[in-house]
Image: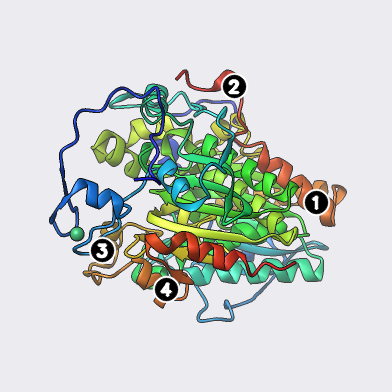
Amino acid sequence: MSWFTKSSPAAPPEPLPDIWHVCSKCQSHIFKKEWEDDLKVCPKCGHHDRLGARERIALLVDPGSFREFGEEILPSDPLGFADAKGPYAAKAAAAVKKLGQSESVVTGSGDVNGRRIVLAVMDFRFLGGSLSTGCGEKIVLAIEHAIQFKRAFVMVSASGGARMHEGILSLMQMGKTCAALQRLAAAGLPYVSILTDPTTGGVSASYALLGDVNIAEPGTLIGFAGRRVIETTIKQKLPDDFQTAEYQRDHGFVDIIAQRKDLKSVLARVLAYRVK
Amino acid sequence: MTSSPAKRVAAWDVVQLARNPGRPTLRDYASRMCDEFVELHGDRVVADDPAIVGGFARIGDVRFMLIGHQKGGSTEERIACRFGMANPDGYRKADRLMKLAEKWGLPVVALVDTAGAYPGLEAEARGQGEAIGRSLLVMAGLKTPILAIVTGEGGSGGALGIAVGDRVLMLRNAIYSVISPEGCASILWRDGAKAPEAAEALKITAPDLMELGVVDGIVPEPDGGAHADPALAIALVREAVLENLRKLSDGPSGDRLVEARYRKLRAMGAFDPKKAVKA
Ligand SMILES: [Zn+2]
């Protein structure tokens, strides 16, 4: 459990944990301790369960090397949006409080086997990892930081798409983040994109698939349109492996599929090829 | 007569106007707004997507690259071009034509009218997400001016995929949204019939987008909407194209243009602590 750090010391005490974890894919009962030691990968079927941003950061960077920035950027409510369940502002504030992080992405710098990088890590638990104005702003700040300090930029995506509660300004974050990536490329700096479950919608249609190298965890859902929308549109059943990481690799959109336990070493090996 | 841009209309009524099949299509603008249109076909990889049409265009002595979604006129044509919902091949064609415009020194005029990118098996297999993302990257770095005009429906990533502009305009009865009102209603209201409420909440009309700083101007429409008098609607867009291309030609070029475009995008949704939610 050394890679696992509690997100916030201020979080309320957790209820006593159930000793069993039930795999959401194969329904096997696994000792929770064993499952957590295996980085939340099912020992029976290999299913990679979702990780929070801080768990992911602990997995990817050297212990103690992560320096967070951009945590002052909180969600905004540019439309004054409210739906059937009430105002968006309250929902967003609750997510900040519950997860102890300011937005659906955590950004900062850290070392991968001693090599300093800038990284932005999305968290699906924060309103479905949705791309909002705050999230877009944090990602752009991270990319600008990478440019300023001539670092490689590593993006870890986990998102259902744009945050509709912030309307058109969420959509514009797709353009804004890609424009920052264009500057990163113009500066000759590496961009490694790590796609984790799920990477769909507007995030798949902006920065997630634009890496110099795209790396995905096994079984990750990666796609633009939702399976049901496509099935309704084309009136046919889609293959089981449709939009998996393996499907995307076989269609030319993912370079490497890495097991979670190997992810850091694969990232380190790739980054070592930046020699200029 | 044209309607006043100040008049407040219910968003759901604007949605109906924006989707009216009698509105001018890209091919109407190409043939009736332009004095010449030389269509260029294909993405040079697999296909020529009929949902995105482009080519060299001229109004008077002003030459530019015209690119846009083609929704189609007749029922057969609408089906053939998937109602303007593009495949990855469409975005890759747009990329190719934009780079060609840059190379030959032409500005780009992009006319946006789509419900969204096509949700299909082949679209996914050929990388719909990657294609749109790549387009965003290409437009961000393009060293020639881009004028984007939402003429009807500006549906999400499928619209933005050709619409990162130095100037972005909307027709008075066009809409531009992160998600369709129906889609938003079915997710957040769990009831597609609440689309009119979602349309209002999403702020998708031209005056809304002006206020949010996403568009730079509103092109007037004939009374009753563009379908009521297509010839006048086309003439008004023609006037807007000429006026805005003139403005852009007086503006920065090359690296300074790319920098200005970045600053424009960078300001959209920039963080303001005073507007943050209270955690
Ligand atoms: Zn399992």
Mark 1 vs mark 2: give the one in front.
Answer: 2
The subunit letter for the residue under badge 4 reads A
Can residue B133 be seen in the rendering of this structure? yes
Q: Give how far apart the Cα atoms at labels 2 and 4 are.
A: 41 Å
Q: Which residue is mark 1?
A: B257
Task: Please name the residue shown 54% across and 36% down the image.
Answer: A133
Q: Give how far apart the Cα atoms at labels 4 and 1 are.
A: 36 Å
Q: Which residue is mark 3?
A: A46
Q: Report which quarter residue A162 is drawn in.
A: top left
In the rendered image, residue A18, in percent from the top left (x then y), is placed at: 15, 38
Q: Give how far apart the Cα atoms at labels 3 and 1 are.
A: 49 Å
Q: Report which quarter residue B190 is drawn in.
A: top left
The color scheme shown is rainbow
Quadrant location, the C terminus of chain A:
bottom right
Task: Please name the residue shown 72% across and 48% down the image.
Answer: B166
Mark 2 vs mark 3: give the one in front.
Answer: 3
The subunit letter for the residue under badge 3 reads A
The subunit letter for the residue under badge 1 reads B
Tag 4 and tag 1, C-beta contact below 8 Å:
no
Tell me whether marks 1 and 2 sit on the same chain: yes
Q: Which residue is mark 2?
A: B273
Q: Secondary structure at mark 4?
A: helix
Left or right side of A139 for B23: left
Q: Secondary structure at mark 1?
A: helix
Tell me whether marks 3 and 1 sit on the same chain: no
Tell me whether marks 4 and 1 sit on the same chain: no
Amino acid bearing label 1: Leu
In the rendered image, residue B276, in percent from the top left (x then y), is placed at: 53, 23
Mark 3 CB in 8 Å range of ligand 1? Answer: yes
Q: Which residue is mark 4?
A: A249
In the rendered image, residue A204, in percent from the top left (x then y), is placed at: 46, 57
